[in-house]
Amino acid sequence: MNILIAEDEERMRRLVKDFLTKEGYTVFEAADGQEAMDIIEAKLGQLSLVILDVMMPHYDGWSVLRHIRKKDAQLPVIMLTARSEDSDEVFGLELGASDYITKPFSPIVLMARIKLLLRQQPENAACAMKEFDGLVIDEVARVVADDGKRIDLSPKEYELLVYLAVNRKVALSREQILNALWGYDYFGDLRTVDTHIKKLRAKLGEKGNLIETVRGYGYRFEG
């Protein structure tokens, strides 16, 4: 899959590119709105997702987004911005942005958002259904079911389960989980993770055993 990252701050652009490359994506870089426009003109049919900084030289992210939507109504576009006003987020979504992330952000959270958007594309929807010993996770419908019976999870419990399942067989530290789901600027302590794991296991019933405790470290999903 090909992803375009348009960001005028080189350090940020390289950081995002490194994360994407490690996940196996091919990355195109643009340092300003004009470069982004040029790449879109040349590669539009080949791009799977676009990441746009709002404030860029020559053309801002809003202008590039408008250009994309004139040519492709379905291409996922994530907007990056230092602004946090609700009006900016609403404006971006009304223009056709698929998601909106405020700086500073966790690269792990960005990767999770990217993967979710890509799985929601029609050609990838079948890959969004995961089954573990009768436990089914449907990431498009955001539904979890145990042997056909739906399990009612809170949004954070659902995100926690998906994060563990995506990293199946990998031991995740409490700090990793906290940063990925609550963000680096979260002021709570690591017990927040333990509390949510306990609630999630209770709701999963017997399938709660799929989440193993790694003593003195964190948790691992063994589905």
Image (spheres, rainbow, N blue to C red):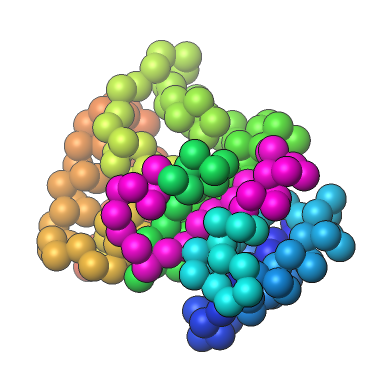
79 part of magenta stretch: yes
Q: Quadrant of the N terminus?
A: bottom right
Q: Is residue 147 left or right of residue 123?
A: left
3 or 10, nearer to the observer: 10
In front of the other: 201 or 123: 123
Q: Which stretch is magenta?
A: 65-90
Residue 155 position within the rendered picture, expressed as x and y whole percent measured from the top left: 31, 36
Outermost top residue: 149
Can you see residue 95?
yes
* Picture coordinates of residue 188, whole percent (x, y): 13, 61
Q: Position of residue 44 (x, y in %)?
A: 80, 54
Q: Residue at x 64, y 79 (%)?
A: 31
Q: Is residue 83 shown above or below 159? A: below
Q: Is residue 129 magenta?
A: no
Q: Residue at x 30, y 29 (%)?
A: 153
Q: x, y percentage for residue 7?
A: 57, 74
Q: What is the residue that sits farthest to the front in this orientation?
A: 58
Q: From where the camera sits, is residue 172 visible?
A: no
Q: Indicate left or right for 184 with 43 as reference.
A: left
Query: Is residue 97 or residue 176 the one in the foreground?
Result: 97
Residue 197: quadrant of the picture: top left
The residue sitting at the bottom extreme is 11
Find residue 73 and report its image quarter: top right
Looking at the picture, tell me which residue is in the foreground, 193 or 16. 16
Residue at left 78%, top 67%? 39
Q: For the point 13% across and 57% down, which residue is it?
A: 191
In this figure, what is the number of numbered marks? 0
